[in-house]
Image (spheres, rainbow, N blue to C red):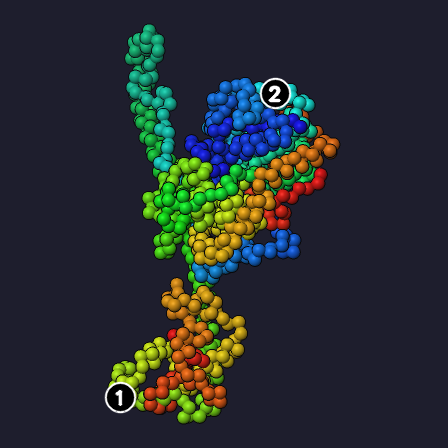
Amino acid sequence: MATDQHSQGNRRPHFHRGRRGNERRGDRRPQAPAAAEPARTDGIDVDQIVREIKARIAQRHGIDLSASQIQELAARRLEAILDPRGIKPSLLEQLRKSAGTPAQIAPVEPPAGYDFEDHTIYDSHNGLLRGIRKLLNPLLKLFFNPNPIAHALNTQAKLNKEAAKREQERERTQAEWNALHYTLVERLVTELSRTSIEAQSLAMKVEALSTRVDFYERRVRGLENTAQPAQTAAPAPAYAPVPSARPSGGGDNGATEATGDGARRRRRRRRGRRGPGAPDGSGAAIAGTAAMQQIPGDDEGDDGQMGDADGPDENGMEPVPAFAAAPDAPAEPPPPASVPQVVSEPQVPAAPAAEPVADRGPTGTPEGS
Amino acid sequence: MKLAVVVQRYGSDIGGGSELHARYVAEHLAAHADVRVLTTCARDYVTWRNEYPPGEERVNGIAVERFPVARQHDTRDFARRSSFVFEHRHSLEDEFSWLDSQGPVSPGLLARVERAGGEFDFVVAFSLRYHTAYHAARLSPGRAVLVPTTERDPALGLAILGPALRAARAVMYNSPEERATLEAVAATRDVPGVTVGIGSDVPPATDAGRARHRFGLANPFIVYVGRIDANKGCEDLFDYFTRFCARTERLLDLVLIGTPALTIPDHPRIRHLGYVSDVDKFDVIAGAEALVMPSPFESLSMVALEAWALGRPVLANGRCDVLAGQCQRSNAGLYYMNGREFEAMLEALLDDEAVSSRMGENGRAFYAANYAWPVIEQKYLSMFDRLTSEKPRASIEPRPPGWFARRRRRLPPAAAVVAALPTGPVRDRPESSSRPS
């Protein structure tokens, strides 16, 4: 139980309390059906709020795991790779311990009597006996020569010492290699886990972006399909008058351009794409509505996540303006009931059919971006 | 009615979780019954060193009998035994050795409980994982009322705890999550039980402006109250909060109240007030945008309840089933699982003042309905009445006979037992539910 701020200095460690995630957690408790839950009359459902926020985060960022969670995941993957059933648990534990710590190999002590010199065969703890042996040594040499035997044993003793030293060195190197291999494998698995999570996250992002692309394609098709009949049906004089000799750079050129207001130029600059057959805003208005009707449910751009912000979103994409009226819409005169809604500035002369003000919303809001 | 409260440590200067819980319960039940506390001479739970004099004294008007602890706590021995019983197949004897190593071993206290016989109507034993509570429950068949105060740690998976829980006359749980866990691990469904928890002495009125002025809290802030420790999730909290500050221009401070056990980051938005009086603490909480509770291990968070009592929402660590469950049942707080969720939940609380204040109101109602002292006292008294009118159940299950049987290592690792238990907050059981026996 948590209490308040009282000090518990020198706190006893909680053994194994650090186990987190699935490692320490069993199945989720079965939750009661919604009907069994207490009635919520306060208008706030924390669970619902949390779920919505989590869904938003998942939509925006994909999978999000902390460093410790990735470590846990990697540890489980590593255990799966090492397969404790096939490896001695003590060996695995030894590897874990040896990783990151210097190898501690006890020096091999040669057993007593490993040294063998020329006089060794005559050695004795009894001084008298040692003296008698020395006295009888010439007699012994009458029967055979012990010197080659002593020499061979001496050499063998030296070889044994060197072998023990080499073995010790080999064990130390092997332990270091084992530790290095274990560390390498562990880090590789961690990196692999991190990479696979990132790949999964990126795949989700790609999927989200492709959904958006699909949406825009359908929307463009809808606009195109709907704009063509509108172009043929609408009378030419009702179209928005656009300057006939306007330079492509949009500079002020001539009296008519001089009288054109800044808002119009702003809209032209923001216009992203011209529909091939949509000569004015009326067609676009209908097209916009038709597009909405044509692809119900395709509202990824209007969910408050990707298209509602003023600036580019986290993917670097410009926001998608809503179909609703733009802020400057009320300033424009309402269109006649019998005439398609027109985006026009009265002082601007008539425009050729080649320069339509296309892709506008019902009130002149640019559709493309 | 005469009650004995058995607890491993007791004193007005002891602020530990279950010890404070025991003292509050003893002091509040004293208005309804003759309460006597049986405890040890230990003050420090790390060493169990005898610091209080043995004998009888009165603490805040409650009679307290103290008995010496036979031996001090050996941390290394306890670590070794914990590692063994939590991670390896082991025997009953290993578990009893673990319990002895946990302590505090006080033969005098246990002899007193055994001698008491019919002196007390009920023996209320706190914290099952300690030697005192476990043996007091075994020595008081038919009278033991257990307040287990368990967290979801590997000790819950020890096989010796089951018989003690099942032999209790009643179990007073801290939360529905604790109850669900113990029912799953120790099959205590047939033992009368009620989810009680604990109240707090929250003042009727607070002055947030005074605290702001006193501590120079000019910006909006969230507050953490408690020991500033990695075990309490504070490292993650600092990490999440500093990242939140880096990503937003929002003026928001993190105010910390409590004693630090880790280094607090030197960040202009993190304010450490240290140890403050209860009055200041409540004033600061009242002035906070929310109370943040990052601990992943809680059997019950008293400061979260205090924040709710003061009408402030709580932002809790969703890894703690108890906290997440309380947030869900109260509709008075949000919970997070990682840094991004922390930021998003915090922004949700800060952005929508209506929702935030509504959560605060929900918290106030939740506290009043479940954790106000009259409610807590009534739950205890109702349980005592019920137990008085009912016949005691079967006596405690005997230990397995035979020297070899107790030493046969066939029990699964306790950590594995706990890992297999169901997790998650409990939503289908109200805070005050009790089950008929």
The residue indicated by pointer 1 is A255
Three-letter code, disc 2: Arg
**Rendered view: B194 above or below B70:** below
> CA separation, marks 1 and 2?
109 Å
| Mark in front: 1 vs 2 | 1
Chain for numbered disc 1: A
Q: Position of residue B362 (x, y in %)?
A: 55, 50
Residue type at numbered disc 1: Ala
Is there any visible trace of residue A294 in the rendered image?
A: yes
Residues A235 and B201: in front is B201
Q: Which residue is found at the position 36% from the left and 87% from the top?
A: A346
Q: Position of residue A13 (x, y in %)?
A: 46, 34
Q: Nearer the viewer, residue B234 or A150?
A: B234
Q: Which mark is residue B112?
A: 2
**Relative to residue B82, is residue A26 depicted above or below?**
below
Q: Residue at x 40, y 74 (%)?
A: A327
On-image quarter of the C terminus of chain A: bottom left
B117 or A66, nearer to the observer:
B117
Left or right relative to B328: residue B266: left
Please state the horizontal and vertical placement of residue B17, each as a whole percent of the image.
51, 35
